Image: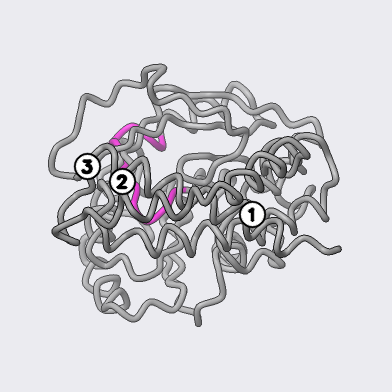
């Protein structure tokens, strides 16, 4: 088999049907690719949805149901069951264009020992999609980002799978990417391998989750640097002296209190945040990240 598309999902039944339909509609021989789906302890009807979707699958659909264990362990469970020579990672909020597998496989045919990154276009809804054309507005400098990335399974055997010590949100894909980079594996960009990333505008109800996620990401940032005390990791995670001083000063100036005052003007907690409110919410999450980073740093 040529390609295994690997997805991990957790409580996204409201999106997963559309995600799978797009993967089933690939412009590629359905006998030569499969979908390996890991249900990481979902409690929202995901199991039943997967079973209903089996009847629509023109390709092999391999489903793995496990207790919630985090993305790294889920990815590794999917890799272990993947039969394809190439493993293509996407997320459970990603809508693939029909050429996704074909474009990844064409790049691998020319570069057999490479990471191939596809284009990711952020959209607020799967019902209103822009043309599948990558522009600089969609640029990402990430070397290895599992929203849309593929590599030969052999490379995973050589450098090792995802590090399962990353049990919380953040950095597990970049950590694997750093090991691949250190092994001299090139990361190539296939701009016609386009996916849409479902990224609705946050509401007031989203703010607490943004802050929790930022704190979890700070804790995994510390793990990342402990594993790889490298300047790339230090810069990527913001663990530098200037960053520490700046955000300590902002806390001293009670920035978070000012941001909360702005967010206190929200009248409808279900309505999308305004531009000013969204900027305040993102800044609040960023300050939570740096505060947790300093709090959790070993003294």
- Residue 17, compared with residue 122, is above or below; it is below
Reading the image, the residue beneath label 3 is 274
The mark that comes first in sequence, 1 or 3, is: 1
- Residue 207, compared with residue 130, is above or below; it is below
Between the residue at mark 1 and the residue at mark 3, the CA separation in whole angstroms equals 32 Å
Residue 98 sits inside the magenta stretch: yes
**Which numbered circle lies on residue 186?**
none
Rendered residue at 50%/29% (across/down): 140
Looking at the image, do the residues carrying marks 2 and 3 touch, with CB atoms under 8 Å apart? no
Residue, far top: 136
Rendered residue at 13%/43% (across/down): 127
- Residue 100, compared with residue 154, is above or below; it is above
Q: Position of residue 195 (x, y in %)?
A: 35, 37
Q: Nearer the viewer, residue 142 or 46?
A: 142
Q: Nearer the viewer, residue 255 or 229?
A: 255
Q: Nearer the viewer, residue 254 or 121?
A: 254
Q: Is residue 4 left or right of residue 157?
A: left
Q: Is residue 204 left or right of residue 36?
A: left
Residue 233 sits inside the magenta stretch: no
Q: In front: mark 1 or mark 3?
A: 3
The mark that comes first in sequence, 2 or 3, is: 2
Between the residue at mark 2 and the residue at mark 1, the CA separation in whole angstroms equals 21 Å
Rendered residue at 38%/21% (across/down): 137
Reading the image, the residue beneath label 2 is 199
Magenta stretch bounds: 90-101
Image quadrant occupied by the C terminus: bottom right
Q: Position of residue 185 (x, y in %)?
A: 74, 31
């Amino acid at each position: 088999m040529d390609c295994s598309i690997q997805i991990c999902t957790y409580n996204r039944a409201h999106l997963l049907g559309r995600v799978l339909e797009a993967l089933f509609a690939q412009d590629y021989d359905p006998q030569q690719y499969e979908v390996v789906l890991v249900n990481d302890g979902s409690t929202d009807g995901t199991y039943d949805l997967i079973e209903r979707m089996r009847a629509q699958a023109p390709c092999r659909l391999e489903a793995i149901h496990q207790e919630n264990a985090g993305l790294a362990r889920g990815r590794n469970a999917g890799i272990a069951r993947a039969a394809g020579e190439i493993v293509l990672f996407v997320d459970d909020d990603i809508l693939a264009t029909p050429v996704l597998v074909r474009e990844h496989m064409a790049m691998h045919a020319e570069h057999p020992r490479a990471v191939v990154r596809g284009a990711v276009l952020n959209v607020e809804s799967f019902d209103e999609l822009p043309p599948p054309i990558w522009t600089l507005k969609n640029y990402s400098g990430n070397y290895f980002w599992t929203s849309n990335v593929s590599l030969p399974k052999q490379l995973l055997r050589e450098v090792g799978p995802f590090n399962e010590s990353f049990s919380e949100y953040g950095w597990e894909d970049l950590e694997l990417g750093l090991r691949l980079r250190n092994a001299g594996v090139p990361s190539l960009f296939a701009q016609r391998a386009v996916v849409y990333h479902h990224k609705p505008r946050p509401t007031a109800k989203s703010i607490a989750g943004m802050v929790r996620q930022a704190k979890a990401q700070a804790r995994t940032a510390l793990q990342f640097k402990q594993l790889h005390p490298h300047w790339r990791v230090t810069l990527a995670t913001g663990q530098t002296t200037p960053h520490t001083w700046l955000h300590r000063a902002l806390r001293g100036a009670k920035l978070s209190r000012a941001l909360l005052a702005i967010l206190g003007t929200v009248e409808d907690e279900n309505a999308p945040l305004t531009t000013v409110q969204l900027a305040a919410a993102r800044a609040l999450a960023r300050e939570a990240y740096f505060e947790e980073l300093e709090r959790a740093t070993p003294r």
